[in-house]
Each structure stands twice: as C-alpha cells, then as structure tokens.
Amino acid sequence: MSPVVAVAGCPNAGKTSLFNQLTGAKQKVGNWPGQTVEQYSGKFSIDDTSFEVVDLPGTYGLVAVSAEEAIAATYLAEEQPDVVVTVVDSSNLTGSLHLVAQIAEAGHRQVVALNMVDVAERRGIDIDESVLEDWLGVEVVRTLARRGQGIEELKQAIARSLDRPAQPLVIDYGPVVERHIGGLVESIVATSEVAGLTLPRWTALQLLAGDTVLRGKLAGVPGGRHILAAAAADRDGVAAETSVECEMELAEHRFSWITELVNEMTGTYTVATIWSDRVDRVLTHRYLGIPVFLVVMWVVLRVTADVTAPYLDWVDAVISGPVSRWTVSLLALVGLDDGWVESLFVDGVLAGVGGVLVFVPVLFALYLMLALLEDTGYMSRAAAVMDRAMRAVGIPGKAFLPMMVGFGCTVPAIYATRMLDSSRDRLLTGLITPFMSCGARLPVYVLLATVFFADTKSMVVFAMYVLGIAVAVLIGFLLSRTALHEEDPSPFVMVMPEFRMPNLRTVWILVRQRTGSFIKGAGTTILVASIVVWFLLAIPLTGDGGFADTDVEDSAFGLVSKGVAPALDPLGFGEWEQSGSLLSGFVAKEVVVSTMAQLYAVEATAEVEAASGFVEDLAEIGSSFVQAGADTLRAIPRVIGLDFVDLTDETDTALQTAVRTSFDESSGGSGQLAALGFMVFVLLYTPCVAAVGAFRQEFGTKWMWISVTGQFVVAWFGAFLVYQGGSLLGFG
C-alpha cells in the first residue's frame, strides 16, 4: 500500500502551489466523505515508491472553528497519514508555526516546507532552518513552490522521514495547566476506548481547548462522557486559577514558545518595505480601494464580453454548420434522416448542447481572469477593502470571498460560506450569494446585450454584475437588521499574501479544472435538459400533429409555458417562448439560451440542408478559426477603450433575429426595456437546481424554501420596476 502524505498549511501559505508541483498532472478531484467540500489528491513516485498525496483544506490550527478546519483536524486524527508536509509562509513565521507546533504535539511524522523564502529575504528576514529542525526533530526544506524550486529535495525528505520515528512535541503550559493536563491524561489512559483515539496528552489539550469535533466524537464512545465531564471541570479550574479562559491560556503559552523559537531562528531584523507593500497602499487605500476594485471588475467583464466574441461566433458557426451537416449525413447513411431521430439529434442535442458550448470561450475567459486575480493575491485585498463598507450594512467582511466565488458558480460559493466564523454569518452569506451573477448567466446577458445594446453591450453586462452586488448588499442589510440581527459581530481576520506576479502554471491548472468541471457537470445537465425539452416539444397535446411533428404551441412544453406566461406579461416578456426559457433555466441557467435555440429553431433548419464536402468543411473551420484569432487580437485594445477598429457584426444570427422579433412583439415595441427586464430576472431568480440542493444541504429545508421563494419575488419585482418604471419614464 502506498504511503500517504497529507499536505497541510495556513491559507495563502502556498500549499496548493506546492501540492500541484508535487503531483503534477496526476491529480483527481472528489468530495470529502460526508462533505461537499472538494478533496484534491494525487501521486508522485521516488525510488520506486509511489506516494499518495492528499491536499488538506487550509487551516490556521487543529482546533476546529470552520468546516475546513474540522476536515483537516478530523483527517489527521482519524486517518493518521504516514507523513504530514506542513507548508510554512517564511514571511509570516509566527502564524504558520502555530500549525506546525500543533501537528508536532499531535505526534505526527512531519516534514516542514519553508515556502516563499524569497519573500522573507526581500523583507530582510534571515532564517536559520537548523534551529527549527533541532527544536522539533523534523527535517526542514526550503521551497519556492510557485517556481518549482526545492520540490525534488522535499520528495527526498518525505521518503527519508518514513524511516524516522515521530517525536511528539511537548510544550510547557505552566504549572496550573500542566497539573490539569496530568489529571486529565490519567483519566484518558484509564479509559481504553478513549486512550486509543490519539495521543492521550494531545486528546487532553484538544478537550481543554474546546475542540467541538473531538467532543462530539467522544460523546458516542464508551466512557467518553466521563472524560468530557472531567475536561469541563478542568477547563473551569484553569479559568478560576488563572483568571483567563482555558483556551486563551493555552494559546498564550504556545505563542510564547513560538516567539522564542522565531527569535532564535531569525535573530533581530528590520522589516524592509518591498514593492508589494507600496502597491498595497493603493489597492487597500481607504478611498481608492473601491474605485480600483470597480476598474478591475470592468476590465474582467470587457475581456469576457468583447475579446472572446470572435471565438463565440466561431464555435456557433462550427456547430450550426459543419457539425450539423455531418450529423445529418451520418444519420442518412443508416436511413434515419428526415424523421424524429434527425430532429432529436439536430433540434434536441445539437441545438441544446451547442447553444451552450458556444459560450465556453466566454466562461474560459472569466475563469482565467478570476484565477489571475486569485494568484496575484488581489482577492484577499478586495475582501479587505470591502470589509469596511460591508460591515456598515451588517454583512461580515469575509462574506465577500464567497460572493466573489459566486461570479464563477453559485454552488461552490455556497460551500465557501463554511470559511465564515459563525452560523449566522454563514446563513446570511448563503442567502445573498445567489444574487451574484454566476458564469452560467453570462451567455444570456451576452445574447440579449448583443441584440439590443450592441454599442454598449459591455456596459450593460457590467451593470448586471454591479446590480447583483447591490441587491445582495441590500438584502443583507435588511436581513441583518431583522431576522439575522447580530449584537456582537466577529472581527475580520485574514492573512494577506504578498502581492505578486501570477504563476502561469498555477493559473492554467485552476482554469483547466474549473472549465473542465463546468463542461462535465453542465454538459450532462444540459444534455438531459435539452432532451427533456425536446420530448416536451415533440409530444402533441392539442392540434392535429403527431409525435415530433407538431406545432410548438400545441406541444406539452408550449402549453405549460403558456400557463406561466401571464404572470410574466407585466414584466414585458409574456410570450410563452420567453417563459419557457425561464422555466428550463430553473434546472440550469446554462440551458436558457439552448432552450431559446430550440424554440426558435425554425430558421436554422435551412442551414443544415446545405451539404458540402468534408474537406471543404475542415477548410472552413480552419480558416474561420484563424480569422477569429486575428479578430481577438484586434479586439484587445478595446478593453481600455481604444476602438481602433469596429468589429461589430451587423448581421444577426437566426437566433438573434428571432429573439429581437419576440421581445419587440411581447413588449409592444419596447424590446430594449423588455430585454433589460429579462436580464434582471435571470440575474435575480434561483440560480439552478444544483444550487438549491447545495443550499438545502448547508442550511436545511426551511431556509431553502425561504431562499427560493425570496429570489423569485425579488426577481419579479426587479424586472417589474425596470420595465414598468422605464415605460413610465419614456424609455424604450
């Protein structure tokens, strides 16, 4: 069986970069048992020995506060990995060594990766790692994970550590605490079921520190309740004798030990001011920080909406042209053309999946920009900048990070609420995060903005993102003053990484994982949804048509959509095609556009009829790809407003023409207002079924229904205000 290596570390210590360097492409992603937090694992080999590597969630210590810390602490306690690689931020030794000390106290075999030593050197910190080796009895390796330096030495150290017995660290916590620890250890040793869990001294320390995970586990162990009662008495005893809460007394002694160690490791030094500090003076400035953030988000959305447009058109042309023709030709070879099977593949599968895959370049660009911001360290700075403004309306500053994750996908954003400190903060953030505009909504914005706001589409798309933030803040303000009022908010605590140039390898891994996850997850959902929609379109309920040969209005889907349409008529989009698209969007926002493509598929059939040679099709694909690349390069200057050339395609696609006609007719000529209201509705109503499931898992059925109902109500009134208010003011 392969030795298991657990990679642990504080957030922003470079743990993920080091894990990526250790495992390379040999990685897999799943979920922790019983959890929805993603688990990353991989392999590496050295001297014919294969090692299994598990990347633990970032944690500041082993006393569980958040869900991520609970996962890390539970894994180390229950799985007992062969080696723990603890990643230390060399420029923040005091914070990082707190975790190192706890892992050593727990009795784990440990290798310390002294990471980001270049940052420490620039700050004038000269580290003598031999001191740490002597104090802990572990091997210490200097690494620069972002550049891949020290990785081979780290692998060798991991292999050597297997032959070295673990040496549990013993810190002197003073006579009062040590007396209570000793008594509790005696009780633990006398209870065999408890003594076998972990080192008795470590069990005693965790109980005195109030670790809820361990306390919950002991409650179900024979003799465990007796130990819990003894620990509670010892905690009260320490507090009475020292006039300090027990966990604070433990932390004070541990940090005193760490301070002494750091002083011996580094000596006396003066922290130097580096360029990252100077940049931070602007990025985190009290008044300049928020305008800088808005400019950054503007650039991100200009890139996603404008620069990727040529490739969007290329994918659309390939799917609606050569791919559709090839599909029809293959079906003709087996005698299945000109029937319901051809309709299923062309109007169902290709129109559905293809209608979404056409926007993969847009999502790729969005994930790329977000990954660049994460890897530079800007995300943490954005959270710090927004903390003051968010706390003014009752929202915790840390909530900004899950909200930012929500720009990519709502599901991981809901799970990311676990990083917050209190259940109230997690619930509040979970309720407002779905209003953030996830990547799946972007195709809808791009389609309607291109049709109705061609000259200002970037501004319109940007306005949707800003509106999502504004609505989330408003809802958070109302909830924090009513149902989720909090008297004593928790402070904002976050380790700020050095602002740095992004590592392209790390960025590529993040983009590849997120885009691949979207394609795999959304692909299945979209395929199933598209086929279901096709069947509903194919089943006749009225009229004289037969299966797959009926007017759309007479189909099952048409009748259901017509039943919903009157409720949306005051919003300017009461046509059944529009309501049908929104219904399918409840399954996944990715299928709103694909449903439109299916409902307005009449004009597209003519393109499939025109056949051409296979070689000619390949030549067409290749030449159009090259042209898309050239157009992309020419579009880049537009991000900063340098419109050297107009790249706008004045020719609408069949879908765009149908959408323009439909919205103009449904609104009596106010197509722009109706389209804007439609985008607002898509922004504010329930993201998708997967997000609803994630919310239920995190917060329960009651709050799930409150969330879903509230989102539909907010979406309806938001679209109503846009359309009716705009009409009263004479717009449209």
Image: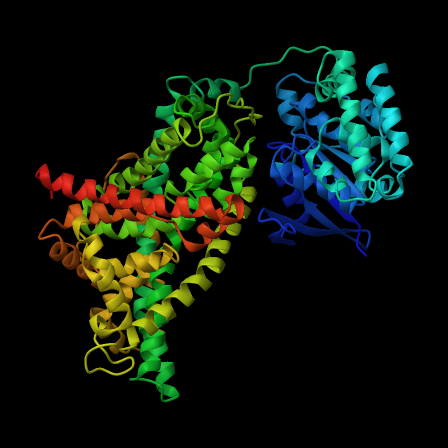
Q: For residue 253, what is the image quadrant?
A: top right
Q: Quadrant of the C terminus?
A: top left
Residue 201 drawn above or below residue 71: above
Which residue sits at x=56%, y=30%?
Answer: 421
Which one is in front, 257 or 112? Answer: 257
Horizontal side, residue 450 vs residue 134: left or right? left
Side of 194 relative to 448 (left or right): right
Identify the image quadrant of the N terminus: bottom right
| Residue drawn where x is 64% and y is 49% of the image | 32
User: In the displayed structure, would residue 486 be above or below residue 719?
Assistant: above
* Residue located 37% across and 41% down the image: 435
Spot occupied by residue 98 in the image (x, y as percentages of width and height): 72, 25
Pick whichever, 257 or 239, lies toward us. 239
Q: Quadrant of residue 237?
A: top right
Locate residue 285, reporting x and y percent. 42, 18
Q: Position of residue 588 (x, y in %)?
A: 39, 56
* Residue at the outermost bottom position: 335
The relative height of residue 320 versus residue 491 in the rendered view (above or below) is: below
